[in-house]
Structure formats: C-alpha cells, structure tokens
Amino acid sequence: MGKYATIRQFMEKNYLHFNAAAMVDAAKGYEAHLTAGGKMMITLAGAMSTAELGISLAEMIRQGKVDIISCTGANLEEDLMNLVAHNHYERVPNYRDLTPQQEWDLLERGLNRVTDTCIPEEEAFRRLQKHIHALWKKADDAGERYFPHEYMLEMLRSGVLEQYYQIDPANSWMLAAAERNLPIIVPGWEDSTMGNIFASYCIKGELKASTMKSGIEYMQWLAQWYIANSAGKGVGFFQIGGGIAGDFPICVVPMLYQDMEMHDIPFWSYFCQISDSTTSYGSYSGAVPNEKITWGKLDIDTPKFIIESDATIVAPLIFAWLLNH
C-alpha cells in the first residue's frame, strides 16, 4: 500500500497548514460531533450533483453520517439526470476558450453547459419530465399536495427510471436518500429546470400551483424537525457553497428563538462552510462564521470552520475521512 494506506493517513501527514489544516480540523470536528451523538445537516449549493458528489455522499447517507439535506432544486434534479443520462453528457475541458459561437453551437445541439460538463437536454430533462408530470397530474387531479422532493422520491421508488440507469445506482445520493427515507428540504425549488417546467404547466392551466407545497411550508416542516432533533448534542451544519441551500435552513434557529419566542431552543452545535467566496463586506457567503453569532444562529462556543477552497475537491476528501477510506 506504500507510505499512505488510506486517504485519512495521507491527509493527517500532509495537510498541516492553512486551508488544508482547516479541512482536517473540520473533518475531525464533524466526526467528534457524530461520536457525541449529534446529528448533521448537509447543504448543497452550486452544481455538486453534476460534479458527481453522489459517489461519496451516497455512502455517507447509507452509513448514517447525514441526518437531513438542504439543497437547491438544481442539485435535486441533477443527481437524477446524471443517473439516467450519464452516457450522453459531454465534457468540455477547454471551456475557458469557447467563443460565443461555440457556446451557441452547444445550445443548438441541446447541450446545456455547467463549467466543463454539458447536460443533454433531451436525454436528461425530457426523460424525467414525462414521468414526473404523471405524478404531478395525479396529485393535481386528486386535490393532493406534496413537496417537490417528495414527487421525485416517489418517482425513484416506483422503479420507472430503472430502465434508463447509466451509472452505478450506488453513486446516486438521491437513491440513497430514498432508501433511507432521509429528510430533504429544497428552498427556492422554483429556480430549477423542473421548477420552470412545473410553472409552464401552471401557466398553460394544466396544473395548479397549489399542487406543489411552498418554501414557507418547508420552513414550517423544518421548524418541527429541528425542535424534535436538537436535544442532546444537537444538530450540526455542514455547508457546501453558499446561497439559499444554506441561507434558508440556518435561519430556523433565530426564527424559533426570536419569532416563536422559544428561548430554550439550542443553537446549531457545529458549523463548517466550504466556499471559494473570500471574506468581504456585505457578502453573506463570504461572511466569517462569527458574524452568525450576532444573528442568533451560532453560539459563542460552537465549533466553527471555514475552508476557502473548491468544494468539488474538499467535500469528497472530508467524506473520505469520515468513511475511514
């Protein structure tokens, strides 16, 4: 096996300073939090599903090292798109050099680019659309209402997508979440391809907007979940990237404390953010963790870590540490 038998050993030997050391400290803090009986929320921003974070995140879910996920609508659907259309994706390693005409040519071929990876519209979006529409329509006709992720989990559990699988199902974090019945919240789901498609059906009068539960209802649900799960060591907050995936759920604590006047509600008991947004004035994603103390989100002694680096590199390494790889 050579000098380093495991990824953990490599990290312990080499990652001793600066962002590398912060990454190891954060991994150790995550591990200590779980060992002490704490629970952990992971928030997914950016394009982490298209970056195939599911390869490591799915195993984290299966091993019970994640208790709840908050993610953007894009990350929710893009894990499924990768599951059913992976062979049709195209990688563009020279994406920095593309001209506007070359970008237009990709559009004309039905390829939507995410940095160096193009998602095939016909095989990804449209392949899912007919199956998810059937579930939306069924609920609409019955006067039933569900959260966005509930329709997608129902679609997965029904088996209708199995005919399309193009990756090892073990590498889909959504499949792992469906199998474990993992709680998921998806703030701002409307800002996603499936959200846009749903809106188009509503505009055409084919579906009612009320068939989809709202962001306010997600916050109500999260409030009840947090109350039920924050005893003992409490709930940690592991934030990948910035944006609404993290901004939305972290606010449940000050809402319960200040607006619901539940003055015994615990703060988040661990906090880590992986972000390449450098510390700056006015930037929430670039705010240092201590700023969150003033907003009633973190306590004075909450373990706090910020890793200013690329989440596509850092998150799998931390997950490998936690999985003892």
Image: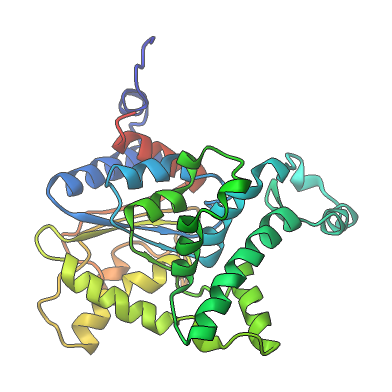
Q: Nearer the viewer, residue 27 or 185?
A: 185
Quick check: 67 above or below 129? above
Question: Residue 313: image x %, image y %?
Answer: 49, 40
Which of the 4 quarters of the picture holds residue 192? bottom right
Question: Residue 305: image x %, image y %?
Answer: 31, 52
Which of the 4 quarters of the picture holds residue 287? bottom left
In the image: residue 21, left or right of residue 169: left
Quarter the C terminus occupies: top left
Residue shown at 63% from the left, 86% from the top: 202
Quarter the N terminus occupies: top left
Q: Nearer the viewer, residue 295 or 135?
A: 135
Question: Residue 184: image x %, image y %?
Answer: 38, 64
> In the orientation shown, which residue stands out farthest toward the top?
2
Quick check: 62 above or below 126? above
Question: Residue 155: image x %, image y %?
Answer: 51, 61
| Colour scheme | rainbow
Which of the 4 quarters of the picture holds residue 68? bottom left
| Residue 219 in view here | yes
Q: Nearer the viewer, residue 14 or 46?
A: 46
What is the tally of numbered marks visible in this picture? 0
| Residue 192 in view here | no
In the image: residue 192, left or right of residue 149: right
Residue shown at 75% from the left, 57% from the top: 122
